[in-house]
Image (cartoon, grey):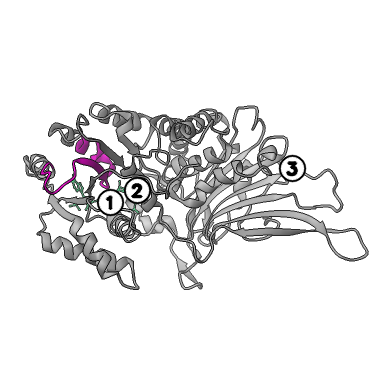
Amino acid sequence: MTKNMDSKKIDPCTLVLFGASGNLSRVKLMPGLYRLDSLGRLPDDMKILSVGRSPIAHEDWQAEVRGMLEAKFYNGIDETVFKRFIKRNHYQANVSDDPDAMKKLEVRLTDESVFPQNFAYFLSIRPVDFATVVEQLASVGLTDERKYWRRVLIEKPFGTSLEKAEELQASITKHLKESQIYRIDHYLGKAALQNIMLTRFANHLFEPLWNNEHIDHVQITNNETLGVGDRTKFYDNTGALRDMGQSHLLQTLALVAMEKPIDFQPESIRTEKVKLLQSIRPIDTTNMDKQAFRAQYKEGNAPARDGHSEHVKGYLHELGYESSVETYAAMKLFIDNPRWKGVPFYVRTAKRMHEGSMAISIRFKKAPMELKEGQQQNWLILSIQPKESLKLEVQTKVPGLDIATRSISMDGQLRQETDDSVDSYETLLLNLMEGDPSLFLHIDEVKAQWKLIDPIVKTWAEDKSPVHQYPAGSRDPKDSGVIFESEDQFWRYSIELGGDKH
Ligand SMILES: NC(=O)c1ccc[n+]([C@@H]2O[C@H](COP(=O)([O-])OP(=O)(O)OC[C@H]3O[C@@H](n4cnc5c(N)ncnc54)[C@H](OP(=O)(O)O)[C@@H]3O)[C@@H](O)[C@H]2O)c1
């Protein structure tokens, strides 16, 4: 199993954080680094050089960092930890119209009296700037690994299509070896996602059942109650399928369905994931209606943060113009290998649903004996959000004189109150510094994912028929059921026992 939060040795290093004043840095990265420091996981001599586009004085940056932490940790920050943390923090401006900006960064960073010379670059900047920044770093010798390691973490998305991913890859591999590149999908940092592998391979119970002889179908879900918010422009260029499906959902599928790796070394796990992703049957675009479904939310009553519901606008209203971009995407996928032959994997993601949920729901085949009509089949549900749990539904006898069955649920919480809650970015930041690429994507995974998604995106873009609508705050659009292989299949919701039919 991957050993993410085990203490591994971290070489003295400098984390160079590009985009340090951006949203991701504020909300996840700075707080994550502070938390790692508070847990004693950062080496004493580790430094952080934040890089932004505006010039900021050292004291002002320190105040800025404090502000980020105070905004995140409502209960206050630990002043002793903060004192240690802030000493690690430095700031360097990379002003866009300064041709010498990178040279200045190089001069600053190679001052060994301040910065350890192993560098981990975290590119928390716009995806269109990834290649340029790598090129600039290389031009001043900052990616050279002759004496020290130099790693580059690339935020998601890695390209917006297979072609764009290949272009980005070609551009950055002029300067970097594959072993220097850490392509992030922060979902892989979630403990509950890593738990998929553990559940499968650390229990004798599941593996013998994990195949087409016993499993009827699998559903992989990532639904949100939120709408697109103020990200309309980004979202309309992306859509649900590319935003969530291309990486998060397909990575989850790979973990659920891959063969057992020969060991739990990063390379062995990646090899199996790549094999699995490459064996997903391409969608037949001449018969798309039965394999992929898209829709947009219209106005409706959506769950609000306070537990009540609120009336919200539809996607097109928020956008302000016509668009066929989907806020709901579902696909039916088949894996062409002996283990999974004939088993549909339904993968769906949506905004503005009645509940937020991330789960893997596995329905087993019908029992040999059906004691009453409509008797439920066994379900195994690995819930990742809103709660991390493992739930198995089985049929038992209803006490009494008659022979009748009902579903009961064995529901285990994966998280206990005393367990540490670790944000996925904390795990991934640590892995980057440790040099553990297990939870990062290999280029072959990225390519296989785009290869699968591209034809659907293209077919949808060219399809001028009206896009299905669903009211905000509702369940899956009824018509989405068109992709089910058999009439007795239905979308499973995470919470309700025994499923929920339309
Ligand atoms: N926010 C999230 O929750 C989230 C989630 C998943 C993935 N991501 C990915 O993470 C990356 C960052 O997202 P974000 O939301 O933080 O974006 P953001 O708020 O726009 O922040 C990006 C920051 O990078 C700075 N910047 C741009 N080019 C730079 C350069 N060459 N050198 C140094 N700084 C530079 C920008 O400065 P200026 O403002 O001066 O231009 C800005 O402060 C994106 O690739 C995004 O796709 C974000």
Quarter of image, res 410:
bottom right
Q: CA distance from mark 2 to mark 1?
A: 11 Å
32 left or right, relative to 1: left
Q: Residues within 10 Å of mark 2 (few under 14, many from 20)?
A: many
User: On the image, numbered disc 1 is attached to which residue?
Assistant: 43
Q: Nearer the viewer, mark 1 or mark 3?
A: 1
Q: CA distance from mark 3 to mark 2?
A: 41 Å
Q: Residues within 10 Å of mark 3 (few under 14, many from 20)?
A: some
Labels 2 & 1 near each other (Cβ < 8 A) = no
Q: Residue at point 33% right, 48% down?
A: 429
Q: Nearer the viewer, mark 2 or mark 1?
A: 1
Q: Kindly identify which numbered label has been placed on residue 365.
A: 3
Q: Which residues are magenta?
A: 110-134
Amino acid type assigned to the residue bearing label 1 in the image: Pro
Q: Is mark 2 within 8 Å of ligand 1?
A: no
Q: Height in image: 338 above or below 385?
A: above
Q: Nearer the viewer, mark 3 or mark 2?
A: 2
Q: Earlier in the sequence, mark 2 or mark 1?
A: 1
Labels 1 & 3 near each other (Cβ < 8 A) = no
Amino acid type assigned to the residue bearing label 2 in the image: Leu
User: On the image, numbered disc 2 is attached to which residue?
Assistant: 430
Secondary structure under badge 3? Answer: loop
